[in-house]
Amino acid sequence: MDGAGTPERITPKDLPGTHDYNFSPDARWALHTYSTFDTPPVYELVKLPEHRVVRVLEDNKKLHRKMKPWSSRPTEFLKLDIGSGVVMDAWLIKPRSFDPSHKYPVFVYVYSEPHSQTVLDRWSGRNVYHRAIADLGYLVVSMDSRGTPAPKGAAWRRAIFPSLGPLSTEEQAAGLIELGRNRSYIDMSRVGIWGWSGGGSNTLNAMFRKPNIYHVGIAVAPKPQPHLYNAWFQEIYMQTREVNPEGYNRSAPINFAAA
């Protein structure tokens, strides 16, 4: 795989979103799963290579009907240029009653660690929670900063080495500032943030390192001290504490809590 070939799309052109395949041993058949951020998944058996649908296994019609009113205002996918050649992917959910002449508080959903992305055009039950928050009068946003497993090359993935936290904190804040720069309806004086696991850690980082930007946070299952977390995860990106003590100190959100 030298990248010299011509890219060829193998998923249906009229179905933008996320496609997953489980292939038969002879690759003539596949279990195909398709969804978007606003559309629950459809499961079907397809014949390859023509991608002919042989049988719909689950269409989730009932869930589609229930979700249709919630997704009357489609999720907006964005590119945020934060300088130095770094362009982050993001999504933005607005209230169904959105009025651009009003100002809205912002609620950030963060992960921004190497295990996964949050900015994918793919269904997740968590999206329903975020839509409910938006309908309470919030703008809900999520951004993938460097280090996340986006298909942007090795340099993007390795930028966070050897300390998880410092870079993502800076880039998440920069992305939020860029988001609000040309959008008068964003109230930067009312910003909340939440995340789980690595996102919980980055919520603490945001609150402790950038208190001038973030005003409230919900940190679920965070890692206040990374050396107390699973070694198999931390040592991939930060080596050991003995080899990289400064990296661990810079990564620990608790070290930046105000006295």
Image: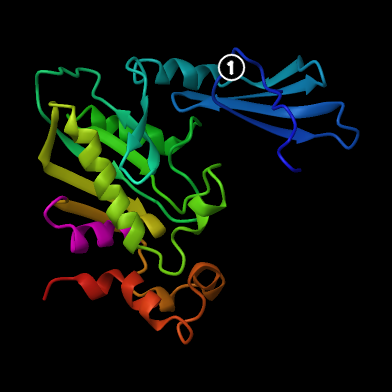
Q: Residue at x 39, y 43 (%)?
A: 85
Q: Residues within 10 Å of mark 1 (few under 14, many from 20)?
A: few
| Residue farthest toward the bottom in the current orientation of the protein | 242
Q: In the displayed structure, would residue 177 be above or below residue 21? A: below
Give x and y (percent) for residue 25: 88, 37
Was residue 169 drawn as part of the magenta stretch in this picture? Answer: no
Q: Nearer the viewer, residue 54 or 224?
A: 224
Report if residue 224 is visible in the image.
Answer: no
Q: Is residue 232 above or below residue 32?
A: below
Q: Is residue 119 left or right of residue 30?
A: left
Q: Which residues are magenta?
A: 201-213
Provide the residue designation for mark 1: 15
Q: Main secondary structure of the magenta part?
A: helix
In the shown orientation, is residue 221 left or right of residue 182? right
**What's the amino acid at mark 1?**
Leu
Q: Quadrant of residue 179?
A: top left
